Structures are given as C-alpha cells and as structure tokens.
Image (tube, helix red, strand yellow):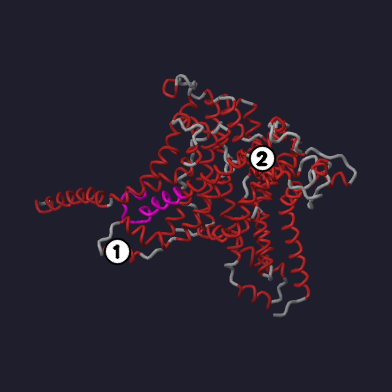
Amino acid sequence: MLISRKERIFLLINNILLAILGFITLAPFLHVLAKSLSNEADVSAGLVTFWPKGLNLKMYKVVLGSEEFVRSFGISVFITITGTILSVLIVSFAAYPLSKKYFKGRKCMSFVFVFTMLFSAGMIPSFLLIKNLGLIDKIWVLIVPGLFSTFNMILMRNYFYTIPPSLEESAKMDGSPNVIIFFKIYLPLSMPALATIAVYTAVGYWNSYMSALMYINNKTLYPLQMYLRQMVIDTDAGLVNLNPELINLNPEALRCSIIVSATVPILLIYPFLQKYFVKGVVLGAVKE
Amino acid sequence: MDFLQLSKRTNLNKEKKHNILEELLFQYDLYLMVLPALILVAIFSYAPMYGLSIAFKDYSIMDGILKSPWTGLDHFKELFASLDFKRVFTNTLLISTYRLVFQFPIPIILALMLNEVKNNSFKKIVQNVTYLPHFVSWAIFGAIVLEVLSREGMVNKIIVGFDLKPLLFMTKKDYFRSIVVASQTWKEAGWSAIIYLASLSSIDPQLYEAAIVDGAGKLRQIWHITLPGIMSTVIFILILRMGSLLSTDVEQILMLYNPLVYETGDVIGTYVYRVGLGQMKYDFTTAVGLFQSLIGFILVLASNYLSRKTADTSLF
C-alpha cells in the first residue's frame, strides 16, 4: 500500500505524541518507585525523579515485614475472594429467572433492581442501618452490602438472552428442573460474561476503602487500601514516628514503598485479566 | 348476554386464577434463585430509605428514628440558607462541569490517535499503559498524586530547576479543583477511550478508501468520516455524564483534600461524611444527601429521556 510522505509524517508525529502520553501516564508511578528504592537522604533533598539514587531496599524490608501491612493485605485477599465468589453466584442466580420471558413478576422485579441504580438513600441512612444491624467493626460489613450489583446482573441477563432457547426446551422435555438447567447449560456457556463480572467485582472489592472508612474503627480490621490511606495521613502528620517499628525512618520513602507494595498485586494480575476488562466494556454496551 | 357466554366467562376467570397460582408453585425454584438478591437489595438499598425520614425530624440516637420529633422542612430551610452548603454545592457543580468539559474530549482524541496506529504491538502497549491507572485504587493513585506534587516531588524538582521556589500545591485552594480534574483525567482517559475505540473500529473501511480515492487528506477523512461515525456514541455518553452532574468521586477527594482547601474542594459527598459521620449531625446531612439524590434522580431521568429522543438509545 502506497503511503504518501505527508501521511508518513502524520503517522510519525502521532506515534511520538502517543509515546509521550504513555510516558506521562507512567511517570508518576516511576517517580514513586524510584523514591522507594533510593537512599533516604537523597529523597529528602528532592534529588530523585525517575531513577533511584543508590539502591536501598530497607524500606521494603520494613513494609513487607510489618505486621500491619501483612494483616491488612490478608484481609483484602479474604474479602476480595469471598466477596467475588458470593457476588458472582448471587448475581447470576438473580439474572437467570429475569432473563426468562415466562417468569411471572419479571418486569416488577427488574424495576425494583433498576430503581436502586437511580436513587439511593445516601451515606447517613446507610450508616445508621449498618449501625443498627450491629455490623460496625465486623469484617462482613466489608463484604455483604456490596454483594449485589444491578449493573452486573443486567450484564449477565443480557448474556443469558443470547443463549438459544432450544437448549432449555429440550432439557425441559427431558424433565430437567430449572436449577439443573442453569448449572449444566447456562453457566458453562456464560463463562466469558461470568469472568468479566468476576473481574469487575474483584477489582471493586480490592480497591475500595470507603466502607472501611465509614464502618470500621478497629485498625486490625483495616483492608490494604485503608491501611495505605492511614499511613499516608500518619506519615504526613509525623505520627509514624510514634510507632516503635517505624521510628527514625524517612516518612516519604516509607510512604512510597507502601504505595508500590500495594500496587504490585494489581500489576501482577493485570496482564492476565486485561482481556476480560476490555470484553466487559463491549458486553456492557450490548443493548437489549 | 346469554347463559352460555356467561358461563364461558366465569370458567375462563377460574382458569386464569388457577394458572397464576399454579405457575407460582411451578416456578418456585426460579423465585428461590432471585431471593438472595432481593433480600440484599431490600436490606441494603431499600431499608435505608426509611432512614431518610430523619431529614424531616430532629433526630437523636436515644429516641431512635420512630420517636424523634418531626421538624418538617426545617433542615431544608437551613440547607438553603447555609453558607456552608452553598459553598459545597458550588464546588460540586464546578468540579463536575470542569470534568465534563475537560475530560470529555481527551478520550476521544486519544482514541482517534490510537486508531491511526499501524503497528499493532505499539498500539497495544500504549493502550495498556494508558488504561492501567484505571485499575489502581484512589488510595494508591491519590497517594501518588500527593507524592508527585509534594515539596520534594517531581514537579517541584522541575520548578526548582528553573530557580523558582517550590510550591506546596496541595495547600493552594486555587489549584485544588484543577488538580482534582487533571488527576482524574490522568486516571480515566485511557479507559474511557476504549468505548470510542470500539465504535471507531465499526466504521466501514470502504468509506476511508473512497475518500482517499477522492483525494481527501488525513484531517479531512477524520472530519468527514471518523467523527460522524462515532457521533452517536459521543452523544450517548455525554448525555449519560450529564445525569451524574451532582455526584463526585468521594474516595478521590477524601484522599487529596485537607482543611486548607475546603473552600474550593469540599463537595457534597465529603461534607456529608465529615459533618454527618464526623460531627454526628445526622439529620441535617441526611437532608443534604436526600437533596443530592433527588436532583441526581431527576437528572438521570431527564438525560435518559433526552438520549432516547436524540440518539435513539437509552439506558432503559
């Protein structure tokens, strides 16, 4: 294919600009990474931009050895795995009947679910409810309220629509009950959609700190993001030096190593899961 | 009506009733399947709505919701008269509008640029790099922004390099809104570009070929083919965004703000959190939240209606 000179210049400029954009996006991460690996003195002096000055792994030893970090990491892992498995089950369970035209009350129930996307009671009423249910400072408060997502349910429901009804008809003629049809036919065929909502749900659980902020006062129950947030605030306020483990450490370098340590899990999982992320956007855009 | 017709009628009615009950029992397992979701939604989405009543009461924890005395619209009157609320409401609206104006074109441009890339692996690398920040939490990204803008951070290092005094960005209320919008763009632009990329790839390549034959240059092609091709997606998303005008990403602002920037950075969500949960002024902040939810509700309905009328697509 003949490319004119003008077009070649255009493509070149385009690629250069994109490369610059890509670098700008990465730059803050690189900056933090560099600070976390540098000599403490150099960090304070503001000498670090993208490349670490002197290789200093001390901060990582402290962070990864810190009981609070490891515990909050474990809590995040627990709530993410439990929450995701339960959520995917509950969401697909609900999506299945709603995808059947013969299901009585379908329109009404769909409205009940969709309405929650339009209007919510707000932060304070939710807080009062959790308080009255006695869920404050209980680890399940980080899992249960977020279990059902109407958005994910709609995604699953739309996917169920695309499965040929003849499969269900023949199974019913063989006398198969609905639940068996669901588990043996629909679920296996919906793997792409299930994987997508699983990934979305997992990322949601892993990243959120709002629930912990509102409902957890006990520091031993902090998930990873909440721990990170607390450390950022504490190191800023100079409070970290009260902790015997962390005394005499450069708060900035410490902060940066915590940030990197908290980011690494996502970075590791990302390459494996990114195709599901993208698929999900396309799936979500499919209209009824 | 003769006897025959009458009896047929009553028979039909009996059959109908019989069928409804029968069907309910017949499909009982389907109802069981929806049950967990219904229970969750009943408890965590609808039950709190009962608590909305304290927006109209003088709530005290001791009396509980039922026994707290009614105060009617007093909280709302207080709301509209309160300088605090006006400030918070303005901030929310301004930040959302800046977001709409600045964050909107950037993903589109990014998608257009990515669409032109011939080398597939380069394209993939840039894509993956730009939508990586979307998957990082605001706890992490907020902390990173704070590091970048700190006195010893990257940006100040450049400033110091020009022999100027370092700037404590996060303490400057005039910069705060821009920092909020810019950092969110940074985080989300790559991800938002995906939707546009998807619709870009659905444009018929023959249109491009015909345009090249007619002698159209790159820019002309973009103007006449590409942009109209994604117009319906653009309008749809634009209208959708308008529906969330009064909502903000509270996790982001909670990470980035501090008392020095409350004047420009305090939004409805953070105000409700700080004054409601923090200072325990439950009834007043519930009224604030209710106000926000109601307006949001109306906006979403309105934008959905608009979207159906113009772009012929809607959420429901």
Q: Is residue A229 magenta?
A: no
Q: Is residue B205 above or below residue A60?
A: below
B186 left or right of A274 in image: right
Give the answer, above or below, for where A218 lies relative to A180. Answer: above
Give me the C-alpha separation between circle 1 and circle 2. Answer: 57 Å
Task: Pick the residue in front: A79 or B44.
Answer: A79
Q: Nearer the viewer, mark 1 or mark 2?
A: 1
Q: Determine the chain carrying the residue at label 2.
A: B
Q: Is residue A97 magenta?
A: yes
Residue type of the residue flagged with mark 2: Leu
Position in image of residue B145 (x %, y %): 71, 44
Q: Main secondary structure of the magenta part?
A: helix
Residues at circles 1 and 2 in contact by the CB criterion of under 8 Å? no
Image spot of residue A189 (x, y percent):
42, 63
Chain where mark 1 sits: A
Q: Which residues are magenta?
A: A85-108
- The number of discs equals 2
Disc assigned to residue B94: 2
Residue at left offset 79%, top offset 52%: A51
- Secondary structure at badge 2 equals helix
Q: Position of residue A234 (x, y in %)?
A: 69, 33
> How far from the left and from the top, in percent, is residue A273?
56, 58
Residue denoted by label 1: A171
